[in-house]
Amino acid sequence: MPELIIDNLHVSIEGNPIIKGLNLTVRQGEVHAIMGPNGTGKSTLAYSIMGHPNYEITEGDIRIDGKSVLDMAADERSRAGIFLAFQYPVSIPGVTVANFLRTAVNARRRYGEPPQEDISVLEFRKLLKSKMDLLEMEYTFGGRYLNEGFSGGEKKRTEVLQLAVLAPAFAILDETDSGLDIDAIRIVSEGVNALKGPGMGVVVITHYQRILNYIKPDYVHIMFDGRIVESGSEALSLLLEEEGYDWVREKYGQAETA
């Protein structure tokens, strides 16, 4: 079974160390939640996995199914099976959701093993409608410009639609619940739940426990000062909901600002 392995990862931004020896293994079919107070490197971890050029990996490795991705650009990592749902998705005026997704699908097909021809308009339309049906989305959504004028909930649902169409091996959800009300969190979570399964591992990065009421984790990890300091079951997230992060700070010291 393919694994996403993060091995002794150290990451710096402009010479400042943020992640300081982080280890994590995610298998397909598993849901891992990474929690922690602000400034502990959670989003830095997400961007580092995806290959953002501003994040310098100074030590350690990131591997998919035994193959290092460190020398891969972000688009290569995407084709290798990594997907990142952004905390703050950007708008792209003039590019419809459907055209954006068809371009992404074709990029994967062209560079696949073996390469494939571009997906036809008819075949893509069937694919997109099937995923929209799964996520209970209106077909008119595909004709809107990507994230332009979208509410916070609509932006996050678009991220989940991308996840559904691209079907990665591993999905990293970077604070997908950020800025959403309870109803929007439930709708987005239902979409993720409809997609997760034996062919996809999920990493949910979050500050709060509330999204985990809907996306049930197999494992919960607490990140603090650039490391995973505690791991356990869903009960660990409930403890954080009840007691907050003060006990983590007392046990492991004051975190540096990321």
Image (cartoon, rainbow, N blue to C red):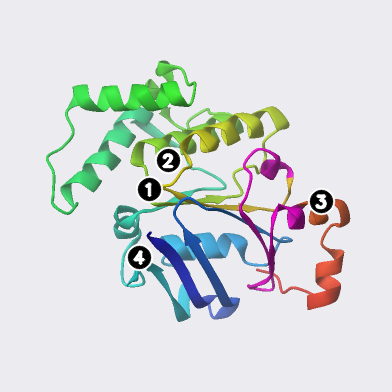
Element under label 2?
helix
Are the residues tagged 1 and 2 within 8 Å (C-beta)? yes
Q: Is residue 99 left or right of residue 28?
A: left
What residue is at 18 percent from the left and 52 percent from the top?
111
Distance between the alpha carbons at the discs numbered 2 and 4:
20 Å
Position of the N terminus by quadrant: bottom left
Q: Is residue 186 above or below residue 206?
A: above
Closer to the N terminus: mark 2 or mark 4? Answer: 4
Mark 3: which amino acid? Answer: Glu
Position of the C terminus by quadrant: bottom right
Q: Position of residue 146 (x, y in %)?
A: 42, 32
Closer to the N terminus: mark 3 or mark 4? Answer: 4
Q: Quadrant of residue 203?
A: bottom right
Q: Position of residue 68 (x, y in %)?
A: 34, 72
Closer to the N terminus: mark 1 or mark 2? Answer: 2
Closer to the N terminus: mark 4 or mark 1? Answer: 4
Mark 1: which amino acid? Answer: Pro
Q: Is residue 125 magenta?
A: no
Write down the residue under mark 3.
241
Are the residues tagged 3 and 1 within 8 Å (C-beta)? no
The residue range painted magenta reads 210-237
Element under label 3?
helix
What residue is at 51 percent from the left and 43 percent from the top?
89
Write down the residue under mark 2.
163
Write down the residue under mark 4.
65
Mark identifier at residue 168 = 1
Q: Is residue 218 magenta?
A: yes
Mark 4: which amino acid? Answer: Asp
Are the residues tagged 4 and 1 within 8 Å (C-beta)? no
